[in-house]
Image (cartoon, rainbow, N blue to C red):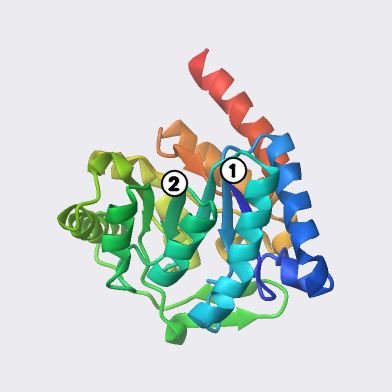
Amino acid sequence: MGIINVTPDSFSGDGLLDSGAEQELGARVVAQALRMAAEGADILDVGGESTRPGSVPVSSEEELGRVIPAIRAIRAACALPISVDTSKATVARQALAAGANLVNDVWGLRLDPAMAGLVAEAGVPVVLMHNRSRPKDAEQRERLGSRYVGVAYGDLVTDIATELSAQVATALAAGIAPEQIILDPGIGFGKTVEQNLQLVRRLGELRALGYPLLIGPSRKSFIGYTLDVPPGQRVEGTLAAIGVAMCQQAAQIVRVHDVGPTVRFVRMMEAILKA
């Protein structure tokens, strides 16, 4: 899953609203989508609201103004499935009408009460992410970016599994088919550096939930703080996290900024693991 951020404030420095005049945005979006498709992406994930620690929420109108033109432009130029990264039902509804194929909700149906019903009505896949993010727990450093501190869990993976199970129950109660559910353990969302490292090491335990797993370690701050590198130098750390997950058979989808290196890495890992 290749990440297309139609934002001015992405933590990873790849927000397309940062990189030139707004009237040229459509061309930049399409160019990035086609490049990711050529590099081997299977899904394109389009988001119009930053979810980095401490980010400022945007209105539905502003988010729609970013993602709907982007989705329409990508759909006209590329046949890959498109995911809309949003927690707002109004945005998801219009994104699906514009050509998106699935919903990636970082709040796992918990932020907007209308989201579960919309997904059920549309009959599309949905990614339910674990998320304990709270602004008061975010700490900012200029070079390394934001991270969460002081977040308490009992047993980290047990707590994540319990909370994801509750989100699945909400989805099923709304009429979302089990085969349409994908789970994301929420690497980087409401977890400290040490908790993120532990989560990656223990991802295999979440297989017991019985749903496909999506992981998103790409350029996350736990890599930056571990290796002391800024977002643009985190591809090796990202691949290390993906490799550990693959060894546990705990990543059916990987959401990344750097599609080309990740595709090559994943193909090599698959060849080794299947040999």
Q: Residues within 10 Å of mark 1 (few under 14, many from 20)?
A: some
Q: Is residue 125 above or below residue 188?
A: above
Q: Measuring from the top left, give residue 121's x and y in whole percent.
A: 29, 55
**Residue 153 in sight from this viewpoint:** yes
Circles 1 and 2 in contact, beta carbons < 8 Å: no
Q: Nearer the viewer, mark 1 or mark 2?
A: 2
- Does 214 sit left or right of 53 as displayed? left
Q: Measuring from the top left, give residue 6's x and y in whole percent.
A: 66, 66
Q: Residue at x 62, y 38 (%)?
A: 79
Residue that label 1 marks? 240
Q: Residue at x 47, y 68 (%)?
A: 91
Instruction: Report which quarter residue 164 is drawn in.
Output: bottom left
Farthest left residue in view: 173
Farthest top residue in view: 275
Instruction: Report which quarter residue 72 is drawn in.
Output: bottom right
Instruction: Report which quarter residue 162 is drawn in.
Output: bottom left
Q: What's the residue type where badge 1 is placed?
A: Ala
Q: Is residue 203 above or below residue 110?
A: above
Q: Residues within 10 Å of mark 2 (few under 14, many from 20)?
A: many
Q: Is residue 202 above or below residue 146?
A: above
- Does 179 sit left or right of 125 as displayed? left
Q: What's the residue type where badge 2 is placed?
A: Leu
Q: Earlier in the sequence, mark 1 or mark 2?
A: 2
Secondary structure category for the residue under label 1: helix
Along the viewing direction, whichever of 231 and 84 lies nearer the viewer: 84
Task: Tell me the quadrant of the picture where the N terminus can be found.
Answer: top right
Q: Which mark is residue 214?
A: 2
**Residue 261 in sight from this viewpoint:** no
Q: Is residue 187 above or below residue 200?
A: below
